Amino acid sequence: MYCSLYCSLFVKNNLQPIPFSESKYHKNHPTKFPNISGQCENCGESITLAYEFSESNKAFCSKVCHQKARKLNGRRGFVRYQLVKLMRDGGREWWTSRELAQVLDNKQMIHTLSAGSVAQHLRRPEIKIMIDRAARKGGSPTQYRFKAEYARYPLVALIRGDFKDSHR
């Protein structure tokens, strides 16, 4: 678990700090963290993640794209987006519904999530296509993971259903 998406990508991509400046007068200055490029979760436009707090978890290119994500179809549509995003970017391969509920319940104050409600969200058709499900024997909980083939696509567009792909 990382403090931000930026820190997760920095470690995952094995990035290194860069010189503060190429100027010979900045040799004694410390290094800085490089910007990381990403994509808007709604429209797919390019965005820049930076080490600064306000830019480290950026997911949308504009307020308009963020508002479209907040208005995803169905009750608690944005919660489903957060579930899928956590599964994709959370740093783990397999998740139980209890683990997903615990992480998201700690992050937000609007909705209370239980393992049962998370499992219901993961059974919705628009979410079901993006995840693999592994039923465990002997009373162990079902585990879920995000399908790697969808990792490069904007999640909001996938959930909304207006993203066209040959897999669908």
Image (spheres, rainbow, N blue to C red):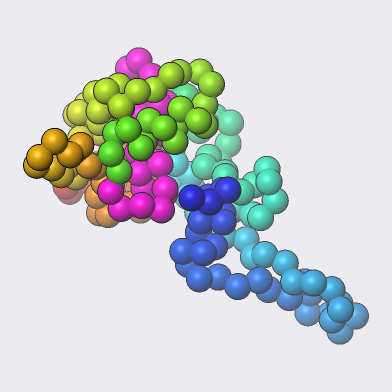
Could you tell me residue 162's position as x and y percent? 30, 34
- Residue 121 falls in which quadrant of the image? top left
Q: Which residues, given as a range, are shown in magenta?
A: 73-94
Instruction: Identify the residue at horizontal 56%, vertical 54% (top origin).
Output: 6
How far from the left and from the top, in percent, is residue 67? 51, 25
Residue 40 sits inside the magenta stretch:
no
Between 23 and 83, the residue placed more toward the observer is: 83
Q: Residue furthest bottom?
A: 24
Q: Quadrant of residue 103?
A: top left
In the rendered image, the vertical position of residue 156 relative to residue 89, given as above or below: above
Q: Position of residue 115 (x, y in %)?
A: 30, 27
Total marks shown come to 0
Q: Is residue 30 visible?
A: yes
Q: Is residue 91 left or right of residue 115?
A: right
Residue positioned 67% across, 64% down in the render: 33
The residue at the far left in this view is 137
38 left or right of 22 in image: left
Q: Is residue 68 visible?
A: no
- Name the residue located 51 percent from the left edge and 56 percent from the top edge: 8
* Quadrant where the image shows the C terminus: top left
Residue at the top extreme?
Answer: 75
Q: Residue furthest right?
A: 25
Residue at 68% in and 43% down = 54
| Magenta-colored stretch includes residue 83 | yes
Q: Position of residue 47 (x, y in %)?
A: 55, 50
Give the left or right position of residue 50, taking residue 91 as reference.
Answer: right
Rendered position, 23 above or below 59: below
Q: 142 or 124, which lies in front?
A: 142
Where residue 132 sits, quadrant-wise, is top left
- Relative to residue 103, is residue 33 depicted above or below? below
